[in-house]
Image (cartoon, grey):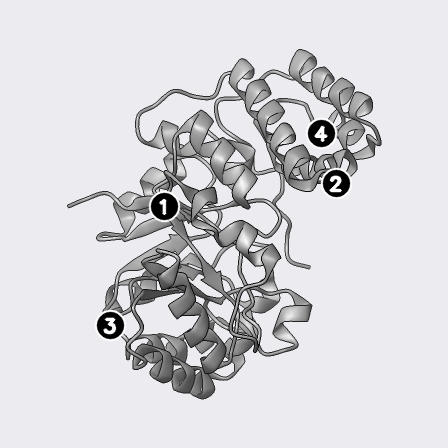
């Protein structure tokens, strides 16, 4: 029985093309990178900004899976065909995003409130004879995990689905509290299509536990923990832990890549601060030191703050779960 693929979750602002290219170069490419969602418009063409992520030349040498955020059949169909024309062999439907601006339009996890409308949508896109495989990423409901009983039945109407990635939280959980793994476990063997697991996988032992417990599993999708420990997948495949010099060189390259992509040092620093929210969890006693990074307004301030962490905070072999938040 083959091991599940190790794939990167789509994280808006973090898993764009600068990250994908730099991460693959320094730590080896993930089995796949799911791209942050693209929202197709009623005009049947991608915008210039969207093409910066989708252009084939920015994803050379890696497996990239574009993700679409829409509830309009027509928009999904034209975008899926356009992605096939660009050379992609898979498109992922986002049914997980919990952002208020997204769900207010009935998209992302907002679509989960309307299971019968969702089934009509899926009927149409799976019967459209598209030249590309369709996968889905979902939560288990809007406000109650019992909603997944009906949603699971809806998904099982489409065994031709490339895969169904399940994040076992409801929308109202956002990313807080414990995942509802009991729901994933209960339904895992009832599905007719390949299943992927997503949610609070932090360490190599977490990956091993999930891989061992759920067989056969198509993939394990990781987002925040890979931002904290970019060597996580390498370690899971028997490779080495990240060294301090690797992390330093990796972050220098990532910063340079964003300076080029944005053409603006200020915006590049803002993006790097988002990574450090997770990355500092790979260092001991860095909770206070990282605040200087958040406050940095100039390149000199930023480099001085990172140097303080590199010199004074020992590098861990596994990331802590420092971004966990409890449900109120």
The mark tally for this picture is: 4
Rendered position, 21 above or below 71: above
Residue farthest to the top? 311
Kindly tell me whether residue 280 is visible in this rendering.
no
As helix, strand or loop, the secondary structure at mark 4 comes to: loop
Crowdedness of circle 1 by 10 Å Cα count: few (<14), some, many (20+)? some
Q: Are marks 1 and 2 in contact (CB under 8 Å)?
A: no
- Residue 104, x across and y down, in percent: 66, 76
Measuring from the top left, give residue 223's x and y in whole percent. Answer: 50, 46
Q: CA distance from mark 1 to mark 4?
A: 34 Å
Numbered disc in front, either 2 or 3: 2
Give the class, few, some or many, for how many residues have Cα within 10 Å of label 4's Cα (few <14, many ≥20): some
Q: Secondary structure at mark 3?
A: loop
Pick the front one: 178 or 219: 219
* Location of residue 28 with respect to 191 vertically, above or below: above
Q: CA distance from mark 4 to mark 3?
A: 46 Å
Closer to the camera in the image, 132 or 233: 132
CA distance separating discs 2 and 3:
43 Å
Q: Which residue is mark 3?
A: 159
Q: Are marks 2 and 3 in contact (CB under 8 Å)?
A: no
| Quarter that holds the C terminus | bottom right
Q: Earlier in the sequence, mark 3 or mark 1?
A: 1
Q: Which residue is mark 1?
A: 63
Earlier residue among tags 1 and 4 = 1
Q: Secondary structure at mark 2?
A: helix
């Amino acid at each position: 029985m083959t091991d599940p693929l190790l794939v990167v979750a789509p994280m808006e602002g973090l898993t764009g093309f600068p990250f994908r290219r730099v991460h693959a170069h320094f730590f080896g490419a993930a089995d796949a990178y799911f791209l942050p969602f693209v929202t197709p418009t009623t005009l049947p063409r991608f915008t210039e900004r969207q093409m910066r992520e989708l252009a084939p030349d920015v994803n050379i040498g890696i497996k990239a899976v574009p993700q679409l955020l829409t509830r309009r059949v027509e928009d999904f169909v034209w975008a899926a065909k356009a992605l096939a024309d660009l050379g992609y062999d898979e498109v992922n439907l986002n049914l997980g995003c919990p952002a208020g601006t997204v769900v207010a339009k009935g998209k992302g996890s907002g679509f989960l409130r309307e299971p019968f409308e969702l089934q009509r949508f899926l009927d149409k896109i799976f019967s459209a004879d598209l030249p590309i495989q369709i996968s889905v990423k979902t939560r288990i409901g809007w406000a109650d995990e019992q909603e997944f009983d009906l949603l699971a039945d809806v998904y099982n109407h489409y065994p031709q689905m490339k895969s169904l990635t399940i994040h076992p939280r409801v929308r109202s959980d956002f990313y807080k509290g414990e995942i509802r793994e009991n729901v994933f476990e209960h339904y895992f063997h009832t599905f007719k299509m390949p299943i992927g697991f997503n949610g609070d996988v932090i360490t190599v032992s977490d990956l091993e536990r999930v891989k061992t417990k759920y067989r056969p599993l198509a993939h394990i999708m990781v987002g925040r923990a890979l931002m904290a420990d970019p060597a996580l997948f390498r370690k899971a495949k028997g490779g080495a832990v990240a060294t301090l010099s690797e992390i330093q060189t990796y972050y220098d390259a990532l910063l340079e890549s964003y300076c080029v992509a944005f053409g603006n040092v200020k915006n590049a620093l803002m993006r790097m601060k988002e990574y450090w929210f997770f990355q500092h969890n790979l260092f001991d006693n860095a909770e206070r030191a990282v605040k200087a990074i958040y406050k940095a307004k100039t390149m000199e301030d930023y480099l001085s703050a990172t140097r303080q962490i590199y010199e004074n905070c020992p590098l861990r072999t596994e990331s802590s779960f420092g971004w966990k938040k409890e449900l109120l």
